[in-house]
């Protein structure tokens, strides 16, 4: 918002681009999980665009992003976050977009030293060069710390009215926000991508290991965000709904997965991902029973639904908590 | 003026917004688009997208767990 406003203040027409990778935190989980109900369901990019009075173009890059995540040239951050490759990719997409839509240059809200991977003094020129944006990429919040870009040289923007922010402190940004009269703003970068989350990254790696390939579909990405994941064997795992919102969301996947729930007692919806055999389904039923109200019963009836919608009941002994090894929990 | 529908059920935001955006690009000013969704987030996001892009939200309603938004292309 700040970078945009700084440029708009110079009389430049700005429109926003928001890329959707499938790993964005906002929206999805807030819509699903009860614990997130208090968080605003607003899309921050849309909200920011509306505050600024600019158009916003949301671009679906789910398919193209796979290569960025699976083969990051610059590697991963603390978890499965390929931040530098991600930034290069998005700036490259932005360059394509401005060419197709007759815009002159790109601005981002980056600040030198603000983020440990993609916003370091050494990496910022890499983003400009490897994205192909080169001197079409202007960072208004720290431009004075960087070489002149084309819009500055051409006089499209006045370099003197740009900023020289650097470092992790956000005080100068907060001060600028105050000057612009922004009372509310989106969460600073970093917490907006599931790939920076340790637990999520562990589940993604588990998925790849179990499948023997680093590939995924959007539904995989979505389902890693919900439920308790338990993998008793390499060939299958259970995704167990933890609450009503998750169960409602998972209902939509019933036709794509073998699924089960307790028939004799109340219990959660469970999706079975993988290729379980009959013995595996009994074990899955025992785990499913463990998370239902029949956990202390001697026997629990489990309704199993195959992908072809064939239904049957199996009778199982619920596993006790201590019978589920810690390493099964993904 | 045509009347079109878009099925964005089972999609979570921002996908219903993206699908709406892509569909609207193929329509003419004055055309009407009815979007069917299951993510409650659309009740905030699609009207916001319409406001910033100059389209009119004619109606929003919730019917049996589905969120339906009628848009007039601006």
Image: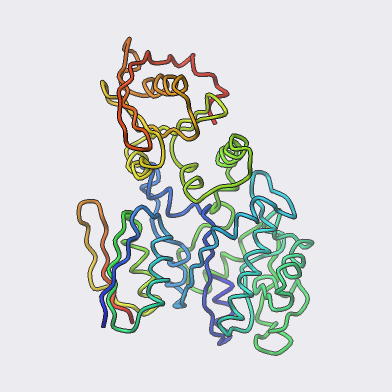
Check the picture and name the quadrant holding the C terminus of chain A: top right
Question: Residue at horizontal 46%, vertical 72%?
Answer: A49
Q: In the rendered image of this protein, does residue A255 appear above or below residue A315?
A: below
Which scheme is used to colour this image of the protein? rainbow
Question: Residue at horizontal 50%, vertical 34%?
Answer: A274
Viewer-closest of B69 and A164: B69
Q: Residue furthest bottom?
A: A155
Q: Position of residue B8 (x, y in %)?
A: 35, 60
Question: Residue at horizontal 31%, vertical 54%?
Answer: B38
Question: Residue at horizontal 55%, vertical 22%?
Answer: A326
Q: In the rendered image of this protein, does residue A200 appear above or below residue B8?
A: above
Left or right for A11, reference A28:
right
Q: Position of residue B23 (x, y in %)?
A: 38, 72
Q: In the rendered image of this protein, does residue A181 appear above or below residue A203?
A: below
Q: In the rendered image of this protein, does residue A91 appear above or below residue A280?
A: below
Viewer-closest of A317 and A127: A317
Q: Residue furthest left?
A: B63
Q: Position of residue A301 (x, y in %)?
A: 30, 19
Viewer-closest of A44 and A217: A217
The answer to which quarter of the image holds residue A254 is top left
Q: Position of residue B34 (x, y in %)?
A: 27, 68
Left or right for B67, reference A282:
left
Left or right for A328, reference A67:
left
Viewer-closest of A66 and A117: A66
The answer to which quarter of the image holds residue A42 is bottom left
Q: Residue furthest top?
A: A298
């Amino acid at each position: 918002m700040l970078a945009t406003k700084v440029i708009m203040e110079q009389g430049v027409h700005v429109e926003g681009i928001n890329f959707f990778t499938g790993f964005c935190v906002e929206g999805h989980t807030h819509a699903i999980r009860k614990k997130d109900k208090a968080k605003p369901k607003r899309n921050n990019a849309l909200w920011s665009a509306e505050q600024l009075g600019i158009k916003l173009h949301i671009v679906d890059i789910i398919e193209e992003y796979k290569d960025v995540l699976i083969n990051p040239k610059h590697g991963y951050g603390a978890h499965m976050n390929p931040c530098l490759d991600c930034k290069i990719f998005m700036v490259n997409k932005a360059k394509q977009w401005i060419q197709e839509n007759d815009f002159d240059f790109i601005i981002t809200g980056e600040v030198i030293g603000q983020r440990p991977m993609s916003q370091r003094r050494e990496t910022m020129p890499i983003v400009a060069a490897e994205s192909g944006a080169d001197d079409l990429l202007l960072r208004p919040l720290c431009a004075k710390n960087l070489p002149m870009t084309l819009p500055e040289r051409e006089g499209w923007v006045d370099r003197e009215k740009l900023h020289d922010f650097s470092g992790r402190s956000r005080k100068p940004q907060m001060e600028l926000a105050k000057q612009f009269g922004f009372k509310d703003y989106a969460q600073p970068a970093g917490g907006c991508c599931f790939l920076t989350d340790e637990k999520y990254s562990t589940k993604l790696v588990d998925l790849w290991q179990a499948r023997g390939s680093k590939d995924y579909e959007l539904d995989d990405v979505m389902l890693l965000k919900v439920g308790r994941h338990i993998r008793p064997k390499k060939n299958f795992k259970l995704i167990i709904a933890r609450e009503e919102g998750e169960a409602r969301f998972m209902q939509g996947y019933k036709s794509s997965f073998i699924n089960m729930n307790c028939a004799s007692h109340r219990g959660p919806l469970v999706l079975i991902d993988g290729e379980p055999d009959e013995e595996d389904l009994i074990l899955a039923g025992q785990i499913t029973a463990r998370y239902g109200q029949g956990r202390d019963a001697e026997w629990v009836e489990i309704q199993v639904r195959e992908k072809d919608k064939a239904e049957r009941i199996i009778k199982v002994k619920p596993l006790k908590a201590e019978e589920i090894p810690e390493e099964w929990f993904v | 003026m045509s009347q079109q529908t878009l099925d964005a059920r089972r999609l979570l935001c921002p996908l219903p917004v993206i699908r709406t955006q892509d569909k609207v690009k193929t329509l003419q000013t004055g055309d009407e688009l009815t979007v069917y969704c299951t993510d409650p987030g659309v009740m905030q996001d699609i009207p916001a997208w319409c406001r910033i892009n100059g389209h009119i939200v004619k109606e929003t309603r919730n019917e049996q767990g589905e969120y339906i938004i009628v848009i007039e292309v601006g």
